[in-house]
Amino acid sequence: MQKKTHPAIAFTALATFATFLAGTACAQPAATEGVQLYGLVDVAVGSFAGSASGIHSSALTTRKIEGGGMSTSHWGLRGNESLGGGLTAAFELSAFFRSDTGATGRSDALPAPVNVAADPLFSRAAWMGLTSPTLGRLRLGQMSSQLFLQSIASNAFGDSMTFGPLNLLTFTGGVLSGGTGWSNSVVYDTPTLGGVTAALARSLSEGGTGGNGAARIGYAQGPLATSLVYQTVKKDPTTFADGITANDTTSWQLAAAYDFEVVKLFAHVGHIQNKGTVAAPQNVGYRLWDLSAAVPIGAGKLLAGYAVRKTRGTAAPVPASVAGGNVERKLFTLGYDHSLSKRTDLYAMLMRDSTQTRTLPAPPTAVEASGTSYGIGIRHRF
């Protein structure tokens, strides 16, 4: 049986935390308080083989304008108010948009059997919170998942969902449920103590049987950084339709990075366990690992990354034209990111995608497919 917290107890705990923080506060605003408009515009042009979820045997190469090669374009508002004594109230509202078409969100709604709604306006972030330098930060609302935050902060390609090998193998293709952002969330971040930080996250399904939970701990001191995250996603498709699969999953990821100055190296190992649904249970595991590097050259960086995802257990055969490869997928990306200023950069990327898929009809056979994508783009932060 799942242990549930009574609403009154949860409300009392939250009120107690806020009251305790407020007890140290004085009503003196900080000079830096206020509201800030911020965002990022990224657009690329190139030739792309297959889709983000993986190359397949019938995939075509498409020449197109891509609204976000190294980062997903977005804009937002954030603000804070000092309540005195180090206590700060803060909020953030942030929305995705597609710089190639001007449309809102990252993609349109997906029909059955995927049943994923189009991104709402502030799908990137919509939260309110309190921060104390001694007690940490507590936030409520829509926020990025702990797994996504760790992934984008600890690989050479950052938050790229077009060319970043780690992000593509982890968050696309229907393997991982939960997506990159969690609605109806409560997130607590500890203050930094001796280079160590930690976070706890809980996303409620609000009346359903689902819900997400995650924990992350990290250490960063000097050139070394490492972190570990674990998350569990129990879906309730009628009220909790995030991600691109309705399956329950658990996952973990260990990340490490070391800056040698002449090169910064990143490495990850991880695992995703697909448990299926109550009506159609599964027990399929996916092992992931990747290596990436950033080498400073002139006013920019040479970027390289290689990632592999392999299936453990028995994955059901699929038609050869289905993207993603349910047996194995490998990605290699090489590129250069050149800084024109502190806020604007130009980039050129080349990516090789290879998959192996167990196909129908019986007896299942392994079909290999590969394709090369490339693009050049410009990114500006404001």
Image (spheres, rainbow, N blue to C red):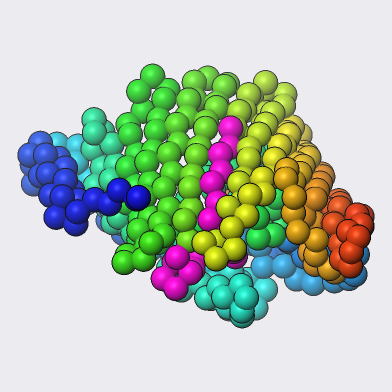
In the depicted view, which residue is nearer to us: 118 or 363?
Answer: 363
In the image, is residue 290 above or below residue 331? above
Residue at the spot 43% in from the left edge and 44% down from the top edge: 214
In the image, is residue 69 above or below residue 89? below
Q: Where is residue 105 in the image (x, y as percent from the top left)?
A: 54, 72
Determine if residue 214 is in view: yes
Q: Where is residue 10 in the image (x, y as percent from the top left)?
A: 19, 51
Residue at the spot 55% in from the left edge and 61% down from the top edge: 277
Position of 176 with respect to 35 (left or right) is: right
Q: Where is residue 208 in the image (x, y as percent from the top left)?
A: 36, 66
In the depicted view, which residue is nearer to us: 320 or 95?
Answer: 320
Residue at the spot 61% in from the left edge and 46% down from the top edge: 273
In the image, is residue 144 above or below residue 156? below
Q: Position of residue 307 (x, y in %)?
A: 76, 41
Position of 78 with respect to 146 (left or right) is: left
Position of 327 with respect to 212 (left or right) is: right
Q: Is the magenta stretch mostly helix, strand or loop?
A: loop
| Residue 246 lies in the magenta-colored region | yes
Determine if residue 341 is in view: no
| Residue 335 lies in the magenta-colored region | no
Total numbered labels placed on residues in the image: 0
Position of 101 with respect to 205 (left or right) is: right
In the depicted view, which residue is nearer to us: 176 or 162?
Answer: 176
Q: Bounds of the magenta span?
A: 236-254
Residue at the spot 58% in from the left edge and 32% down from the top edge: 254
